[in-house]
Image (tube, rainbow, N blue to C red):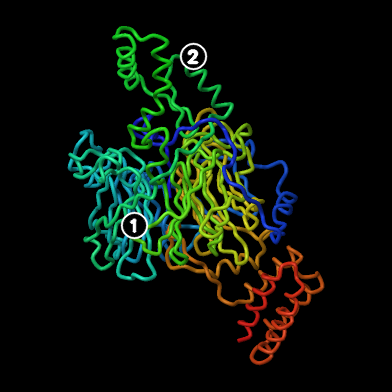
């Protein structure tokens, strides 16, 4: 749902992220099954622009160079000055996109995607202010210790304060022009992200899964919070998520109803270390007398005011005090990663697995959830939404930080993203390994995750561009698995993972770096398909709206069919099941795919297209008769087709059209 970004409060506040070890190999086996003969990967490679126009784009905040392929930018709308901090995640309701920012949230009217208009801005500073919506309710995450209950500026300096919010805010947006702050639910770790669960069996309530990624607050501020291990304190805030139940008719009664420990009994995963360029930077930093810490594969330098007391303490422990020696500095540098992880509740010991999730994506229609849980990717059973149960957990030594999850539409695949570097570092450089900071794609087989392959943005980015896999969504093209994904300053990438072992990019949009000489954080935080357009929250530049353009890899018929899968609202982490009405666009989309995969001969493809065109021009009984005859012929074709399942989908669509 959002980024694990280095703090905007302290340079080390992102040490709630996982440390890395040496590079290893994938810990799971798997491969594409024989029936996967999709040729998109070969077609995409052959048709992609060469040289890649994303490489070497002109830098600039307001006038950067731009590059696109098979998609175009419809509009870029700058953030209003009052909210100009960091733009975060998105939710959708009707014709509106609701954009979180670190200063509150914005309601954009997308009636004209080429000219979005601001309907309402609600000022309420916090981190990260990720939002989700359901009917008349809006939910917003708050995690940082500076977030105030009263939505005022100024922050909070006291270590214990009754004015602090770390948890979930709930608003009534029945009147979009006059939102009402209803209540909040405080949690021990705050809410870095949250996931709204709509249970098909329980229309009276919605559930919120809260993922906190920060340290555990003191019991003096919120009674019951404990950072002790569960073995010694059953109320420990470690190894659990929070489940909030929200009565739709009485949201003011929202409360935590369970704290399932879905992380229990997991071993510490192995991680890779630093990339070659980062190793050199770390050596240079140490040579300069600084104290870099490797956090999610990223070097972070601790400020002097934090280092000096620790160095004094180390010297006292080693030789009774006095000036620190080189050995003291080396000992402190070696101890810092573990020390900071424990400080922020990320580590319960070298032999223990993660203590929290970063993000959870639920798919209520199939009863599954995907948990991106720092050191592991998880498959959860959510048939009882108040009590999710872990079915499987996988680790991968190529992954640094399991950040988010996405199912394909039929629920047979689960994709996880790795936010190596925390979103604030350049991890798409030409020297960076292709398996690091990428997506890992799994098949779901008998409630188990079976690894299939990786996808990473193929265009190398500069060292001045924060770039790594981040938030994306399914593009509902029938018969295919396609995803649009944000890559921070790597831009927006659209890729096909129908064959999960050979995922391939089929469209992109990118800008040059914000600054040519130094890292200035920006880029696409979230890029989501919503009812025919792609809406992207640009961290520094506002709101982007893009559209895919027809091409041999994604035809106009496929795009037209995708646009018929309309939803009334969307929280991407509450994944909907897309369905497509029987239309001529749907039938033609399947024909295009059969042409591409050679599931029908060229002659049959031509004949089917002509038959569909004739039926489309006809009406009444002539149309019905022609379509029924075509459906019967296609059912016969399926018996000898190399893509029989797709032919049967086409036949069923044509028969439904006939009726």
**Residue 222 place in picture, x, y as percent:** 20, 44
Residue 217, placed above or below residue 42: above
Q: Where is residue 81 in the image (x, y as percent from the top left)?
A: 37, 44
Q: Nearer the viewer, residue 327 or 511?
A: 327
Apparent side of residue 184 relative to residue 619 in the rendered image (left or right): left
Q: Residue at x 48, y 57 (%)?
A: 115
The residue carrying mark 1 is: 208
The numbered disc on residue 287 is 2
* Residue at disc 1, secondary structure: strand
Residue drawn at the location 81% of the way across and 69% of the way down:
602
Labelled pair 2, 1 in contact (Cβ < 8 Å): no
Q: Nearer the viewer, residue 455 or 75?
A: 455
Nearer the observer, 581 or 637 = 637
Binning the other alpha carbons within 10 Å of mark 1 as few (below 14), some (14 to 19) or many (20 upward) gives: many
Q: Which residue is drawn at 40% across and 61% down?
A: 382
Mark 2 or mark 1: which comes first in sequence?
1
| Separation (CA) of disc 2 from disc 1 | 47 Å
């Amino acid at each position: 749902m959002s980024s694990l970004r280095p703090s905007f409060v302290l340079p080390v506040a992102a040490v709630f992220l996982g440390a890395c070890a040496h590079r290893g190999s994938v810990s799971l086996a798997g491969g594409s099954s024989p029936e996967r003969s999709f040729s998109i990967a070969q077609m995409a490679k052959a048709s992609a622009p060469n040289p890649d126009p994303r490489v070497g784009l002109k830098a600039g905040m307001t006038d950067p160079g731009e590059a696109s392929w098979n998609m175009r930018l419809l509009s870029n709308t700058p953030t209003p000055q009052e909210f100009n901090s960091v733009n975060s995640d998105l939710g959708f309701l009707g014709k509106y996109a609701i954009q979180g920012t670190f200063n509150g949230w914005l309601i954009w009217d997308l009636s004209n995607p080429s000219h979005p208009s601001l309907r309402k801005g609600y000022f309420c500073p916090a981190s990260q202010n990720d939002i989700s919506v359901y009917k008349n309710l809006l939910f917003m995450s708050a995690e940082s210790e500076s977030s105030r209950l009263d939505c005022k500026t100024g922050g909070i300096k006291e270590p214990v304060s009754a004015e602090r919010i770390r948890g979930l805010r709930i608003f009534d947006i029945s009147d979009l022009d006059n939102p009402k702050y209803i209540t909040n639910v405080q949690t021990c770790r705050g809410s870095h992200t949250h996931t709204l669960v709509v249970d098909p069996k329980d229309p009276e309530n919605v559930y919120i899964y809260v993922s906190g990624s920060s340290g555990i607050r003191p019991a003096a501020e919120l009674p019951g919070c404990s950072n002790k291990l569960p073995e010694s304190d059953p109320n420990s805030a470690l190894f659990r998520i929070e489940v909030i139940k929200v009565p739709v008719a009485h949201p003011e009664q929202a409360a935590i109803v369970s704290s399932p420990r879905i992380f229990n009994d997991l071993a510490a995963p192995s991680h890779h270390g630093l990339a070659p360029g980062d190793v050199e930077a770390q050596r240079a930093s140490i040579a300069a007398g600084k104290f870099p810490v490797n956090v999610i594969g990223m070097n972070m330098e601790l400020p002097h005011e934090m280092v000096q007391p620790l160095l004094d303490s180390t010297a006292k422990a080693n030789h009774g005090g006095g000036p620190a020696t080189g050995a003291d500095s080396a000992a402190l540098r070696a101890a810092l990663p573990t020390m900071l992880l424990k400080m922020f509740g990320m580590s319960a010991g070298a032999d223990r697995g993660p203590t929290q999730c970063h993000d959870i994506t639920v798919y209520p229609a199939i009863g599954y959830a995907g948990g991106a849980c720092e050191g592991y990717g998880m498959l959860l059973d959510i048939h009882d939404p108040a009590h999710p149960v872990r079915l499987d957990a996988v680790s991968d030594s190529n992954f640094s930080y399991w950040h988010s999850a996405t199912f394909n539409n039929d629920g047979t695949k689960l994709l996880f993203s790795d936010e190596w570097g925390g979103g604030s570092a350049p991890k798409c450089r030409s020297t960076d390994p292709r398996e690091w900071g990428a997506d890992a794609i799994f098949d779901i087989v008998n409630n188990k995750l079976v690894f299939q392959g990786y996808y990473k943005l193929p265009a190398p980015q500069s060292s001045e561009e924060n770039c790594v896999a981040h938030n994306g969504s399914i593009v509902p093209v029938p018969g295919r698995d396609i995803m649009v994904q944000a890559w921070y300053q790597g831009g927006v990438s659209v890729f096909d993972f129908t064959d999960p072992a050979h995922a391939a990019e089929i469209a992109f949009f990118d800008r040059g770096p914000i600054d040519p000489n130094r890292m200035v954080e920006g880029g696409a935080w979230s890029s989501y398909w919503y009812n025919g357009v792609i809406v992207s929250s640009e961290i520094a530049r506002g709101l982007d709206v893009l559209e895919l353009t027809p091409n041999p890899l994604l035809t106009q018929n496929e795009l037209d069919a995708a646009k018929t899968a309309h939803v009334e609202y969307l929280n991407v982490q509450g994944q909907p099941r897309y369905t497509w009405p029987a239309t001529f666009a749907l039938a033609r989309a399947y024909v295009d795919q059969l042409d591409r995969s050679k599931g029908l001969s060229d002659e049959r493809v031509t004949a089917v297209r002509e038959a569909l065109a004739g039926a489309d021009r006809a009406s009444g009984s002539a149309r019905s008769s022609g379509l029924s005859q075509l459906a019967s012929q296609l059912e016969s074709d399926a018996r000898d087709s190399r893509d029989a399942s797709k032919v049967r989908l086409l036949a069923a669509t044509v028969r439904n059209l006939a009726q």
